[in-house]
Amino acid sequence: MERLAILAIALGAGLGLNGALRRLNPAPVDSAGITLAHGSAVENAALFSLGMRRLAADLGLIRLLIYYGTPEDHHGHHTVAEHFGSGHYPELGPRAMRILDLDPSFSYAPIYSAGALAFNLDRPEEALAVLRHALSRDPGNPEYHRYAGAIGFHKKGDPRKVLELLEPALENEATPTMIKHLAAFLFERSGQRERAVSIYREIAQASRDEGYRRMAQEALRRLGAEL
Amino acid sequence: MSRLFVLAVNAWQENLRGRFFLLSFFFGLILLYVSLLLGILAADQELRVLVDFGLALIEIIGLAGALFGACTALLREIENKTIYLVLSRPVRRWELLVGRFLGLMLSAWAAMAVMGLFHLALLFLKGWSWENAYLWAWLGSCAKVWVTASLGLFLSLFSSSVMTAGAIAAILWTLGHFLPEMRALIARSPDQAAALPMQLLSLVIPDLQCLNLRDKIAASSFDQAWLGLGYAALYSLVWTGLSVWLLKRKEF
């Protein structure tokens, strides 16, 4: 009987404290829901239950990078026979959207995915779908609008406008190296050598992506510029 | 007060000699190893992954140690009968419990601080620059560990079983992180009467998600963080107070 009384007091105290907290700090309810991939649903649920949403999103990004970094043949099978970038990568968009479901503030994943879809794989519609999903998760993020605009101009074949929109993002440390490399390439192609060299140099010196560092060094050699 | 202090220091020293710092050492080794892999795999996002992985590991190791300590501290003394030696001196039961728990929490937080310093050193080596968000996230983890350990202490005295107390506390830990989802489910439920037990549960289990300040690192919005920390302190005090009450009534 006494234990029941203690339990009742404990429950009452918890109820009072939780009620007060909810009134003072009403936590937002995620009405959009979460989509989990069949291959990582258990892992994500486990990380969720431990309060590690960001870590789940991080692991999703690492998987996405490995997925996009693995050569794929024209039937969508991963292979070592063909070169990087020649595949179809149908999961690139959906994977980025699932990462956003796990951590809506993780803008790197949709920007990386949209950039790869629009500029490397020439599938701007899918890229815009990713950005639309990102905007539904984080409507106030101006970067998504910027990239949507750049992709629109890329679709229309106007690289000057693409660069105009991407240039402010190049100062942002969080911008994927792939986007910086693309901007440098567009500058190079439009005859703005100095600007291209400066971006390639920054990638070669500061990027954490070894592949892009190597490509930037090659580009600098090609342009006859010092590292 | 001095008796309380002596008991807390004694418990702290016992813990320092034990598993806590050994775990910190293993944490360091694991982190070093994983950081090498993550550096290659995460490319541009290496620092974010390192920050997240390190903070998560600090919390899990801190929780494991604190929960185990909370569930076993008094039960072990009761089983070994060493509690008689302490209580035969001019020490009140509440002083024994609060002193032991204080010592346990001090050692858990000290271990988490050591791990945090090691983690920070690694981050600085990788080119990370200091953000206050890190401190908030770490404080949030400490508060979560405190809340769960106080629940574990209460449950160990209530159930008199280390396994049961540990298991229930672990379940409450996971449920505490699912509170926003539980509330969303309740709001969407077509039959509110059927959702009533869940609604009651959602009002009672600790709201650990509000202490999950790691999730707010990107937005750097910590305006309400003090509220969460205050909630954790009150919640822990309530459960520690109930543990005191249980211990007072216990017959040895």
Image (spheres, helix red, strand yellow):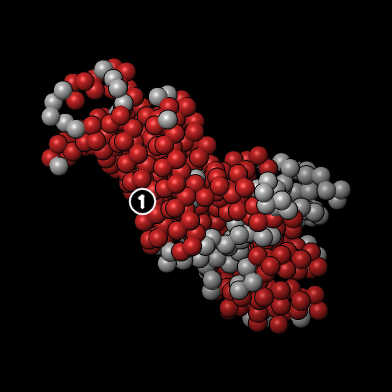
Q: Which kind of residue does numbered mark 1 sit on?
A: Leu
Residue A142 relative to residue B60: left or right: right
Q: Count the labels in the image.
A: 1
Residue A134 relative to residue B116: left or right: right
Residue A127 relative to residue B83: left or right: right
Q: What's the residue at 45%, 58% (across, down)?
A: A20
Q: Local crowd at mark 1 within 10 Å, few (<14), some, or many (≥20)?
A: some
Residue A1 visible here: yes
Q: Is residue B123 above or below residue B15?
A: below
Q: Position of residue B112 (x, y in %)?
A: 35, 44
Q: Residue furthest right?
A: A75
Q: Quadrant of the N terminus of chain A?
A: top left
Q: What's the residue at 68%, 42% (across, down)?
A: A41
Residue corresponding to mark 1: B234
Q: Quadrant of residue B252?
A: top left
Residue A174 relative to residue A39: left or right: left
| Residue placed most toward the observer, B93 or A163 | B93
* Chain name for mark 1: B
SS at circle 1: helix
Q: Quadrant of residue B84?
A: top left
Q: Position of residue B106 (x, y in %)?
A: 28, 42
Q: What's the residue at 73%, 42% (across, down)?
A: A38
Residue A208 visible here: no
Q: Position of residue A135 (x, y in %)?
A: 67, 69
Q: Position of residue A121 (x, y in %)?
A: 78, 62
Q: What's the residue at 36%, 56% (across, down)?
A: B230
Q: Is residue B21 above or below residue A80?
A: above
Q: Residue furthest top?
A: B80
